[in-house]
Amino acid sequence: MENKLLNTGIAYLKGVGPQKAELISAETGVFTYWDLINYFPTRHVDKSTLTEIRSINNESDTVQIRGKLSKIALLTAPSGKRLTATLTDSTGSIELIWFKNYQYVIKALKEDALYTVYGKANDFKGRYSISHPEIKLYQTEDNVKGLPLEPVYPLTEKLKARFMDSRFFMGIIKQILHHPDFDLPEYIPESVTKPMKLIHRKSAYQQIHLPQNKQVHAAATRRIKFDEMFTLAMRAEKNKANRLIEQRGIRMPKVGELFNVFFKKYLQFELTNAQKQVIKEIKDDIGSGKQMNRLLQGDVGSGKTIVALLCMLIAIDNGYQTCMMAPTEILATQHYLSIKDLLADMPIRIALLTGSTTKKNKEKIKQALQNGEIEILIGTHALIEDDVNYNKLGFVVIDEQHRFGVAQRAKLWNKTQLIPHVLVMTATPIPRTLAMTVHGELDVSTINELPKDRKPIKTIYRTENYRAEVMEFIRNQLEKGRQAYIVYPLIEESKKLDLNDLMNGYEMVTNFFPVPKYQISLMHGRMKPEVKDFEMKRFKEGQTQIMISTTVIEVGVNVPNASVMVIENANRFGLSQLHQLRGRVGRGSDQSYCILMTKDDMNFTSKKRINTMCKTNNGFEISQVDLELRGPGDLMGTRQSGLPDFKLLDLVHDDEIIDIAKRAAAFVLKQDPVLEKEENIPLLNYLKQHQQDNFWGRVS
Ligand code: ADP
Ligand code: MG
C-alpha cells in the first residue's frame, strides 16, 4: 500500500480494539485501514431534518424523530419475547420494538432520557411503530440542522447486536479520513484525469463516505468506479499489446481453391451479412502475420459453425492443419458428421477424436495427424491431450467455450512452435462490455442476426394443469411431420431422483404417444456414448418423433426439423440454460415453439426467468437479465470468468464508465507503451503494487 497509515490494523482505531476488530474482520473481511475505507456505504440518508411524531403517516418512509424514552418493557407474547419502549415528543408518541438482540439493547436504554431515533415507521391498524430503530442518546451538540448526508453501511446481525451500526462505521472511517497522515497520491496521469473530469483520488474517498452533497458523491462514485475499470483495462490492453508485439503469428495470406470451391459449389445457403463480416474480420486477422485470439459470439442458431468451417478452409488453403474442439461427445460427433457431409466431395481428410475413440483408432489418427495426413481434426478435449501431436497446426476452433477452463485452453498453445490462430465460439452471449472486460486479451466478433428464413420461436408458459393440452399440441405438430424435444432437469446432487423424473416422464409421454404409431428416443448423461450417438442419429434422421432427454442435448445439437421444445420443471433451469435449450428448435424455416412447464409455485427469480424467456428471443437481452439476477461472477462460473470482484462498478449498468476507462487505457499506452514517461511512473508503480489484488495474475 502506498501509504503506511493505510496498512495499520483496524484494532488501533479509537473505539475498536482487538475484540471488536476481530468481529469486524470476520463479518466483513476488513482488516486494515485501507480495507475499511474501501468498505463503501450502500446509500446515504438525509438526517438534517427531524420529523414530528404527530405528522408520521403511511406515506412516511424512514423518519428521524427525537423524544423522551419511557415504558421500557420486556414482553412475552405467544410469538416470542420482545422489547418495547415508547418515544414521546411534544406532538405525540410512538412505539419502538425489538424482536432480536433485545438482551443487549435493554442494557443500554435509559428510562426518561432524550434520544434521537431513526427508522422506518410501520402502520399497524393506524398505530405507528418502528422496529429495530437506530437509536442514539441525545447530546446537546447534536444539532441536526445542516448535518451532512449520512452513510448507511452494509451490516450484519452480529455487528448490529454489538452496536456496531452505520454511525459506528462512519465514526471509525472518519478517524482515518481526517487523520493528518492520510493521503492517497494520484496515480492516473493528468492527461486522463483532466479531460475525463475525474476528481482527485483522495477527495473521492472522502466524499464517497461523507459527501457534502449529492453531486460530489456522484463524482466520487464515478472516480472510484473509473479506477476499478481503468486498472483492469490497463492490464488487458497491456497484455494485448504484448501479444501483438511478441506473438508473431502464422501468416495465412491467401484465400485459395478449397475455400472458393466450397463457397461456390457446396454452401447451401446465402451467408448473412453478419457472417460475411466476421469471416472478413478473421481473414484479415490471420493474413496479418500476427497471432489471432478471437472470441466469436453469436446467438444460438446464428450459424457460427459454418463461419468457423470457412475459416478453417482458408487455413488449409495456406497449408495448415486445423482442429475443432467441442465440449461434449454428442456435439463433437455432430460437428464431425455434418462437416464430413458438407465436405464429402472435397479433397480434405477429416477425423474424429473423443474419449470413446478406440485405442487402435486413436493410434491411427495420431499417426496420421503427425504425418500431416489429416487436415481437420474434430473432437472433445481428447484432442489436446499431451500425446496428440500435430504436423502443422495453424487454426484452432473452440466451440462453446464457456465449458472449457482457461487452463485447458492454454494447453493448446504448446502444441506447435508458432502459436496457432484461435477462434473461440460462444452461444452464451455475454454482454459486450462484459466480454471486453473478461476477454480483454481477445478480440471480439459478433454475429448479431439470424439467417433470414427464421421465424422467431414462440415461447409460452404452462402449469401442470395444462398437461393434456400441451400433449395435444405436440401431437398436432408431429402430425405435420415435425419433431419434439421434452427435456428434464438433471442436477448433480440428486441424480437418482431426477432420473426418476425422467423415467416417469418417459412413461407419461408413451401413454400419450403409444408405439408403434410413435417412436420415442430417450437420452441421458449416464448412457454409453454409443447409445447416445445411436439415439441422436435416429432422431436426426426422423426415425423417432420425440426426444426425451436431460440437458445432454443442451448445447449445439442441430435437428432443423424439430419444432417443439418442452422444458419440464423449467423453474429449475438457469436463464442461459433455458435459452440454450430453446435454441434447439427454430433452426429451420418452420414456426417453432418452446413450452416452459412447472409444477410448483415459483420463487421470484424463477418467475423473472420464465417471464424473460416468454418476452424475448434475444440472447444478449437474456444474458443481461441473467447477469442482473446472478451477478457477473456466477454467469460463467467465477473461476473460469476470471472476473475481479468489483466493489462499485456494475458491469450491467456502467457501460459509459467501462467504455471511457478502456479508451483512456488504450490512449495512455499508445502514447507511452511501456509507461516510461515521467508522468506515467506513478501509474506503473501503482499497477505493480496492486498486481496481487487483481485477478490478472491468476488468469493469464
Ligand atoms: P450456432 O451458431 O448455434 O452454432 P449453427 O452453426 O449450428 O448455429 O447453425 C444453425 C443452423 O443454421 C444450421 O443448420 C446451419 O446449417 C444453418 N445456417 C447457418 N447459416 C445459415 C444461413 N446464412 N442461412 C440459412 N441457414 C444457415
Ligand atoms: Mg453451435
Image (spheres, rainbow, N blue to C red):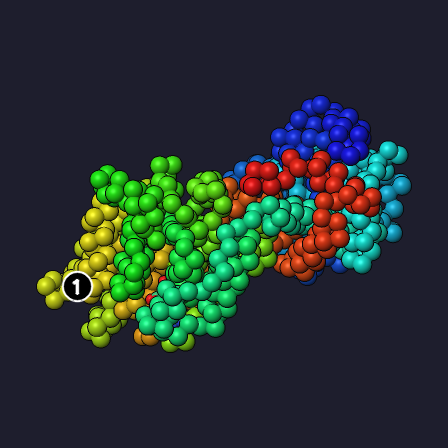
- Which quadrant is the C terminus positioned in? top right
| Whether residue 677 is visible | yes
Name the quadrant containing residue 659: bottom right
| Residue under the image location 80 percent in, 49 percent down | 189
Under mark 1, the amino acid is Gln
Q: Secondary structure at mark 1?
A: loop
| Whether residue 67 is visible | no
Question: In x, y percent, where is residue 264?
Answer: 36, 73
Question: In x, y percent, where is residue 387?
Answer: 35, 36
Is residue 301 positioned above or below 529 on the image? below
| Residue under the image location 78 percent in, 37 percent down | 173
**Closer to us: 213 or 680:** 680
- In the rendered picture of this protein, how many numbered marks are placed on residues? 1
**Closer to us: 561 or 488:** 561
Residue where numbered disc 1 is placed: 543
For this orientation, the residue located farthest to the left is 516
**Closer to us: 75 or 40:** 40
Is residue 441 positioned above or below 515 on the image? above
- Which quadrant is the N terminus positioned in? top right
| Residue under the image location 43 percent in, 46 percent down | 404
| Residue under the image location 82 percent in, 41 percent down | 185
Left or right relative to 243: residue 188? right
Question: In x, y percent, where is residue 640?
Answer: 49, 44
Q: Which image quadrant shows ligand 2?
A: bottom left
Name the quadrant containing residue 10: top right
Question: In x, y percent, where is residue 134?
Answer: 72, 43
Q: Tag 1: Cα neighbours inside 10 Å, few (<14), some, or many (≥20)?
A: some
**Closer to us: 591 or 603:** 591
